[in-house]
Image: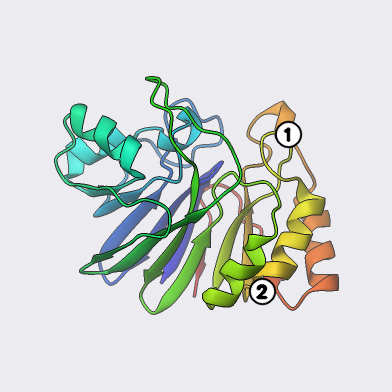
Amino acid sequence: MEIRFLGHSAFELTHDGVTVLIDPFLTGNPKAAASAEEVAADAILVTHGHGDHIGDTVAIAKRTGAAVLAIVEIAEELRADGVENVRDPNLGGTVSFEWGSAKLVPAWHTSTTPKGTVNTPAGLIVVLGGSTIYHLGDTALFGDLELIGRRHAIDVALMPIGGHYTMDRHDAVEAARMIGARKVIPCHYDTFPAIVTDAAAFQADVENSTASEVIVLAPGERHAL
């Protein structure tokens, strides 16, 4: 399986001809590694409704016919926007696909879509190609991250570190310890001035205090598992 960082919190997961996008904020993203018109998608997974996460979901889904998974309130808005293949779990719900599965887990944050739909933010546990990927969404540090790590053997945690709108790189070190993933890929940093941080320092702190390996990807770079 291969993970491609598309910038900000957007990722592309690929395995055996299947492409899964997470939080495809590309249009208007100064760090975007691809455009909404060029990415492929068999599925699109959305952590929450803020514009820098729901992003180009509707346009990509209509162009590609991808299945879209989002929490029920966002799912209803997507259907109203003409997205045909929508899955609508709530927190704790797991949806199976031909390629694997995606589960919504809690995240501490806020969320209202650009159209005004209030919704509960989430993290995503994604199983693809025999690997388990945990996208934390825009969470703050909270104790149940340890529970999530106990319930799921996480191969890669996609973790926000930028601070201001999410946990910062210092809290993210504790999050990495609690989750216990084999690898951690930082995200949601350096996109805007408010979330500029030191990813190399985060890497050093995590690797000095936990068993996790940190992979720092520039937008567009890939990591193979």
- Whether residue 151 is visible to the viewer of this picture, yes or no, is yes
The image quarter in which residue 184 lies: bottom right
Vertical arrangement, residue 81 with respect to residue 180, above or below: above
Q: Amino acid type of disc 1?
A: His
Question: Colour scheme used in the picture?
Answer: rainbow
Question: How far across and down, in percent of the image, does residue 100 sit?
Answer: 30, 70
**91 and 187: which is toward the camera:** 91
The residue at which mark 2 appears reads as 180
Residue at 32% from the left image edge and 52% from the top image edge: 89
- Whether residue 37 is visible to the viewer of this picture, yes or no, is no
Count of numbered badges drawn on the protein: 2
Disc 2 residue crowd, few under 14, some 14–19, many 20+, Cα 10 Å: many
Vertical arrangement, residue 150 with respect to residue 194, above or below: below
Q: Earlier in the sequence, mark 2 or mark 1?
A: 1
Q: Amino acid type of disc 2?
A: Gly
**169 and 106: which is toward the camera:** 106
The image quarter in which residue 109 lies: top right
Question: How far across and down, in percent of the image, does residue 187 sit?
Answer: 61, 49
The residue at which mark 1 appears reads as 164
Question: How far across and down, in percent of the image, does residue 136 sit?
Answer: 56, 54
Disc 1 residue crowd, few under 14, some 14–19, many 20+, Cα 10 Å: few
Residue at 60% from the left image edge and 71% from the top image edge: 149
**50 and 12: which is toward the camera:** 50
Q: Is residue 99 left or right of residue 12?
A: left
Find numbered disc 2 in the image and state the secondary structure of the residue it sits on.
loop
